């Protein structure tokens, strides 16, 4: 069985490659820029924005794990238009694994709306698929909200709820789906704990022995409310084991 991993240079793509390097699968990787280390993997160039290289990328593979994404720049073209063309050139694929995000059908955020639209494109195609939604990754939450204190304060919308999960655990879960075959919409993959951003900031201060303080703010609007209500979490699907505190501690070691 031959697997294609898209988005090979991203956080999820890199985690997938790290775990696939010791597997028995034949792995092909694709991205816009070549990873610094490709190991024994075959790398091919492809770009969902221009749709260049797609045919070569999908040629002679059985399974695709689609880790390519663009949350900030050219999202509409990459997540929807480019993805639609990608699917059009992949009718031979036996199993298309699409990592998605918990709550994208309830959270009024443009990138999430595009991911939800992409899910629909895959569902309506003739390609056998598995869609599995994950909660936000530990590193994503930290980098977005807790990367740098301002005037020795973490300024956060403190009541927002998160159920962050380790990217390597989610990568391992995606790989485990390869041999299970197409599942349709699979169970969500959530982190072990549901915490507020304020609690996560307190943990970072504790683990790193920081002297920083926390300034918790509230924000107006439906987007803030959806995160406040925990639409990005799933209390039933706590599949991950590595906590946010453990993630922070592992960074120090």
Image (tube, rainbow, N blue to C red):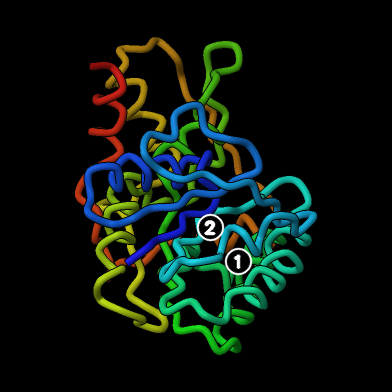
Which image quadrant for residue 76?
bottom right
Q: Earlier in the sequence, mark 2 or mark 1?
A: 1
Relative to residue 181, is residue 38 drawn left or right? Answer: right
Residue that appears at 61% across and 53% down = 69
Front residue of this view, candidates 172 and 96 = 96
Q: Secondary structure at mark 2?
A: helix
How far apart, in angstroms, are the residues tagged by discs 2 and 1? 8 Å
Residue 230 seen in the figure: no
Q: Residues within 10 Å of mark 1 (few under 14, many from 20)?
A: many
Q: Secondary structure at mark 1?
A: loop
Residue that appears at 29% across and 33% down = 247
Residue that appears at 23% across and 16% down = 253
Q: Mark 2 and 1 residues: CB-CB less than 8 Å, in contact?
A: yes
Relative to residue 199, is residue 156 drawn left or right? Answer: right
Give above or below for 216 relative to 249.
Answer: below
Instruction: For the N terminus, give its image quadrant.
Output: bottom left
Residue 114 seen in the figure: yes
Front residue of this view, candidates 205 and 192 = 192
**Mark drawn on residue 107:** 1
Front residue of this view, candidates 191 and 39 = 39
Residue 32 percent coordinates (x, y): 66, 43
**Mark drawn on residue 161:** none
Give above or below for 129 relative to 163.
Answer: below
**Mark drawn on residue 227:** 2
Residue 145 percent coordinates (x, y): 54, 34
């Amino acid at each position: 069985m031959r697997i294609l991993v898209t988005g090979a240079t991203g956080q999820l793509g890199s985690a997938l490659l790290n775990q696939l390097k010791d597997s028995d699968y034949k792995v092909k990787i694709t991205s816009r820029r070549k990873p610094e280390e490709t190991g024994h993997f075959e790398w091919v160039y492809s770009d969902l924005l221009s749709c260049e290289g797609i045919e070569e990328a999908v040629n002679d593979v059985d399974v695709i794990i689609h880790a390519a994404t663009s949350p900030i720049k050219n999202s509409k073209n990459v997540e929807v238009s480019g993805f639609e063309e990608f699917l059009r050139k992949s009718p031979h694929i036996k199993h298309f694994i699409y990592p998605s995000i918990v709550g994208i059908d309830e959270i009024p955020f443009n990138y999430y709306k595009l991911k939800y639209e992409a899910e629909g494109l895959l569902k309506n195609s003739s390609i056998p698929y598995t869609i599995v939604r994950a909660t936000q990754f530990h590193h994503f939450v930290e980098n977005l909200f807790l990367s740098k204190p301002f005037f020795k304060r973490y300024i956060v919308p403190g009541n927002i709820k998160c159920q962050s999960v380790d990217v390597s655990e989610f990568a391992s879960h995606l790989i485990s789906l390869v041999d299970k075959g197409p599942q349709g919409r699979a169970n969500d993959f959530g982190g072990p704990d549901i915490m507020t951003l304020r609690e996560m900031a307190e943990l970072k201060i504790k683990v790193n022995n920081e002297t920083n303080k926390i300034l918790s703010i509230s924000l107006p609007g439906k987007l803030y409310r959806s995160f406040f209500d925990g639409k990005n979490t799933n209390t039933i699907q706590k599949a991950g084991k590595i906590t946010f505190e453990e993630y922070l501690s592992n960074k120090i070691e």
